[in-house]
Amino acid sequence: MTTTPAPDARPEDSGAHPRFAEALRELGLGELHTRIRRFPDATRTAAEAAAALGCELSEICKSLIFAADGVPVLVLMDGASRVDVERVREELGAGKVTRAKADVVRETTGYAIGGVPPFGHRTRTRVLADRSLLAHDVVWAAAGTPHTVFPMEPKALVAHAGATLVEVREPTP
């Protein structure tokens, strides 16, 4: 069962993380508070989010933190695809790219894995967005908690995240 805040709901009623709610206000996206969906069960994975929303897995935007030569970088990827770390390494000109550990994710973004939104982070990081996100009219991303998601047009999401569009998904056989 999904619950959506009433149209006159205050931002703090949306269930979004307070830091993310503030980021929406700062970006002039306050109207998104009424579109945030809160779920009683966690939507930590793209599959859980897609099942809860009743949408395609590829309509979920995953926000993943990697370490490129030890420096955090955010990669936005559609939920049906996997990140090719070699492509990320080449894109960044890095020597080594690895998945960031949970403590680095929280320290960098201010959010726990499973709730990391595409913007509104504690620190400014480089952001890469895979072009596969543009295949949809709307994608759904975490709103700062494992229980909340929000919809956004992919080009707007990429712009608000300050992302560079790239091709970093693993090739499909």
Image: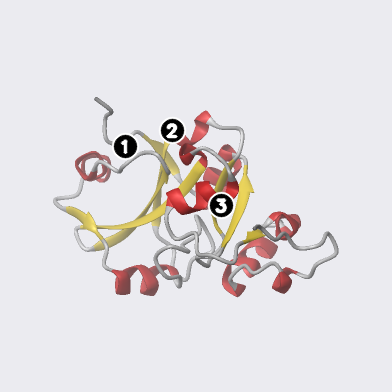
Vertical relation: 6 (above or below) 92:
below
From the viewer's perspective, is the residue at label 3 or at label 2 nearer?
3
Q: Quadrant of residue 159?
A: top right
Going by the numbered disc 3, the residue's amino acid type is Ala
Q: CA distance from mark 1 to mark 2?
A: 8 Å
Mark 1 or mark 2, earlier in chain: 2
The colour style of the image is: secondary structure
Q: Quadrant of the N terminus?
A: bottom right
Q: CA distance from mark 3 to mark 2?
A: 22 Å
Q: Where, quadrant-wise, is the C terminus in this rendering?
A: top left
Image location (x, y in percent) of residue 141: 53, 52
Q: Where is residue 101 shown, x and y percent of the image?
A: 26, 67
What amino acid does circle 2 point to? Answer: Ser
| Label whose residue precedes the other's in the sequence (3 or 2) | 3
Residue 161 position within the rendered picture, expressed as x and y whole percent measured from the top left:
51, 51
| Residue 112 % position (x, y) | 42, 70
Which residue bears the numbered disc 3?
Answer: 52
Residue density around tag 1, few if under 14, some if 14–19, many if 20 or more, within 10 Å: many
What is the residue that sits farthest to the left in this orientation?
Answer: 95
Residue depicted at 64% across the width and 67% down the height: 21
Query: Few, some or many C-alpha atoms within 10 Å of disc 2 (few <14, some 14-19, many ≥20)?
Result: many
In the picture provided, is 133 more to the left or to the right than 80? right
Please determine whether, in this image, residue 12 is positioned above or below residue 134: below
Which residue is more in the foreground, 63 or 90? Answer: 63
* Residue 18 marker: none
Residue of label 2: 132
| Residue under numbered circle 1 | 169
Q: Amino acid at mark 1?
A: Arg
Label 1 residue SS: loop
